[in-house]
Image (spheres, rainbow, N blue to C red):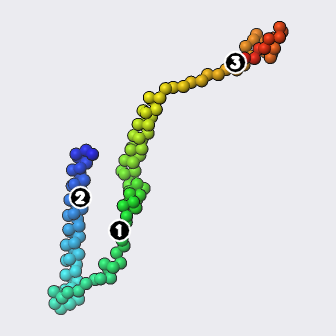
Amino acid sequence: MAHADTVRADLQQQQRQRELNDAVLAADKAHVDLGVLLFPDPTTAYTLAAALDEMPPLPTRTEIDTAAKSNNPDVRAAFEALRSANLEVTAARFAYAPDLNVNYSYGIDAPQFAIHAPDGTRNLGY
């Protein structure tokens, strides 16, 4: 993998971590704002258990790979490039094999169009 791709992946991971931290902060702020609206004392503890219990389970690795192959054009292009490279390697390996040609001809070799010549010899041959 190229160094630039590694750096780009690290930067994307850091950006996603910042976005997660911002989302957690926004959720905490919304929790406090709701507590201010619902209770006279904003430090009253409460939970929203129903929302946490209804979260769908995370998809498996194979489901993520399948979705990435079918929905992401960059990943699909990468897989097709890999497939093309594998086919080029196979073609290069076949270049080491010797070529085999067979040339077979059958027909009439005579000045006249007939199975037998006037002297009785056969005109058909290969």
Disc 1 or disc 3, which is closer to the eye?
A: 3
Q: Amino acid at mark 2?
A: Gln
Spatial CA span between label 1 and label 3: 72 Å
Which residue occupies 18% across, 91% down?
40
Residues 70 and 103: in front is 103
Sooner in the amino-acid sequence: mark 3 or mark 2: 2
The residue to which callout 3 is attached is 126
Task: From the top left corner, tell me how far across and down residue 73 is, in percent.
Answer: 38, 52
Residues 92 and 23: in front is 92
In the image, residue 101 sits, relative to residue 21, either above or below, namely above
Which residue occupies 37% across, 47% down?
78
The residue to which callout 1 is attached is 58
Q: Any mark on residue 13, and which? A: 2
In the image, residue 70 sits, relative to residue 49, either above or below, namely above
Q: Quadrant of residue 57?
A: bottom left
Sooner in the amino-acid sequence: mark 1 or mark 3: 1
Of the 4 image quadrants, the one containing the C terminus is top right
Task: From the top left corner, tell me how far across and down residue 20 is, in percent.
Answer: 23, 67
Spatial CA span between label 3 and label 2: 73 Å
